[in-house]
Image: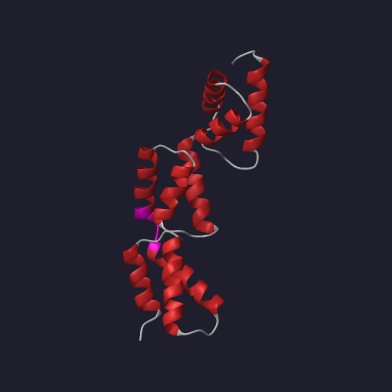
Amino acid sequence: MSKDPRFKKAVFLVLQKLSYRPRSSSEITEYLKEKSYDEPIIREVIDHLARIGYVNDVEFADYWVEGRRKRKPIGHLALKRELEEKGLSEDLVEKIIEKEKGSSDEYGAARQVAMDRIKKMGDIDKRKAKKRVYDYLLRRGFEFDTVYKVLDEVFKG
């Protein structure tokens, strides 16, 4: 561990940021760049925090996916986009998405989102409601096949 006071200050700042929620190494890098830290200090801070278990991109990805599943469900496409925006490597994102596809019920989540959306719409024309739900599910990152299946079930008849 470096004796450089800038290193200690950077670690302190990052630990404060981590006290709110876990962060990816990329988010930490961007944060420290915004605070005008140079690359060697940033690398040293991330390496140090990774060694002691405070920064782990795999754990962060699992945390993010679990949170999304509980708070405001989204489809695999949107989840992939969010993980990429968090600066996770392409390989890691692909592994997480494949794991998520195997362990989650995207159809069930999309159906629940659709039902919640329909309740909020009130009494409107069936075609208009179907179009709105269709658009909403696509914006939430659900795959086309899933959206069509959900719409067929929810708006049958």
The residue located at (60%, 42%) in the rendering is 21
Q: Residue 92 in the image: state x and y as whole percent.
A: 39, 39
Which residue is painted at 54% across and 36% down in the image? Answer: 27
Identify the image's colour scheme: rainbow, by chain, secondary structure or one colour.
secondary structure
Q: Residue 85's x, y, as percent? A: 47, 43
Q: Position of residue 15 (x, y in %)?
A: 64, 32
Q: Point out the stretch of residues depicted in magenta.
A: 101-106
* Residue situated in front as seen by the camera: 108 or 23: 23
- Judged left or right of residue 110, residue 116 is right
Residue 80 higher or lower than 157, as above or below: above
58 or 41: nearer the viewer: 41
Q: Is residue 46 above or below residue 146?
A: above
Q: Is residue 124 left or right of residue 21?
A: left
80 inside magenta stretch: no
Quarter occupied by the C terminus: bottom left
Q: Residue furthest left?
A: 145
